[in-house]
Amino acid sequence: MSEPLLRATGLRKTYRIGARLVEVLRGVDLTVDAGEFVALRGASGAGKSTLLHLLGGLDRPNHGEIHFRSQSLAALNDHDLAKLRLGQVGFVFQAYHLLPELDALENVCLPGRVARRDPAEAERRGRELLRRVGLEHRLEHRPAELSGGEQQRVAIARALVNQPALILADEPTGNLDSHTGEEILNLLCELRAETKATLIIATHDARVAARAPRVVQLLDGQLAR
């Protein structure tokens, strides 16, 4: 039996808001195999984004453990955790998070440059990914010159530029109209199938969740049984 790509056990996450402690995750166990497509479904405030941030190493749990390919994330210092994120995890956010001063190609190539990949190779891959998402004619356009759907396509290309094993998408269609959202979802599914990457999509939308072979429900900080 091969080791799962991700294994989370007993995850708890609490935030302090003023004088109040808010427990967002209350003991989450989740195992995801390499190549899986999982939808993480739950209402707003259920803890979906928090769980994705923990699984991708953007934040650390108060309690519990996360293993990525048998490597405990808790055992990594901040530098090594950032290195793992950069090389192994691609993030797609609802708000795109593109740098406004960079054009589409520069935004896509940025993770490759941060990872000190060969600049020519990073640009070649960036151009190919933008072609793959249908934006080969928009390479030099900045985010303000792109529609919401086009910005999300740039964000998807950026997430894939370092050929990650894991793609984490947090409400990737949430800021888009239904037609554009369907196009983005189709694109994510196609690219996941082509790259054999593991895909976890957090969504409150039943139509989005229905596209995944496996759906897990997050309710009040816990996975529903």
Image: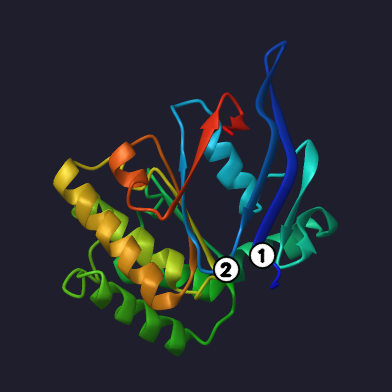
In the picture, measured across the screen, residue 171 lies left or right of residue 59, that is: left
- The secondary structure type at the circle numbered 1 is loop
Residue at horizontal 68 percent and vertical 67 percent from the top: 83
Mark yes or no: residue 106 visible: no
Which one is in front, 127 or 187?
187
Assign the C terminus to one quadrant of the image: top right
- As displayed, is residue 170 above or below residue 156? above
Which residue is drawn at the image coordinates 18% and 41% (left, top)? Answer: 177
**Left or right for 91, reference 77:** left
Disc ID at residue 4 = 1
At horizontal 44% and vertical 70% (from top left) the residue drawn is 160
Left or right: residue 58 compared with residue 92: right
Q: Secondary structure at mark 2?
A: loop
What's the CA distance linking mark 2 and mark 1?
Answer: 6 Å
Please say whether residue 105 is visible from this viewpoint. yes
Q: Horizontal and vertical percent for residue 69?
A: 71, 68
Comes first in the chain, label 2 or label 1: 1
Residues marked 2 and 1 touching at CB (< 8 Å): yes
The amino acid at mark 1 is Pro
Is 148 or 90 nearer to us in this picture? Answer: 90
Give the x, y percent position of residue 182.
21, 51
Give the image location of residue 44, x and y in percent.
44, 27
Above-or-below relation of 22 to 87: above
**Residue denoted by label 2:** 34
Q: Where 204 falls versus 156 (above or below)?
A: above
Taking the spot 74% from the left edge, 58% from the top edge, the residue there is 67
Q: Viewer-proximal residue, 185 or 151?
A: 185
Compared across the picture, whether 194 is left or right of 68 comes to left
Look at the image and tell me in which quarter the N terminus lies: bottom right
> Within 10 angstroms of label 2, few (less than 14), some, or many (20 or more) residues?
some
Binning the other alpha carbons within 10 Å of mark 1 as few (below 14), some (14 to 19) or many (20 upward) gives some
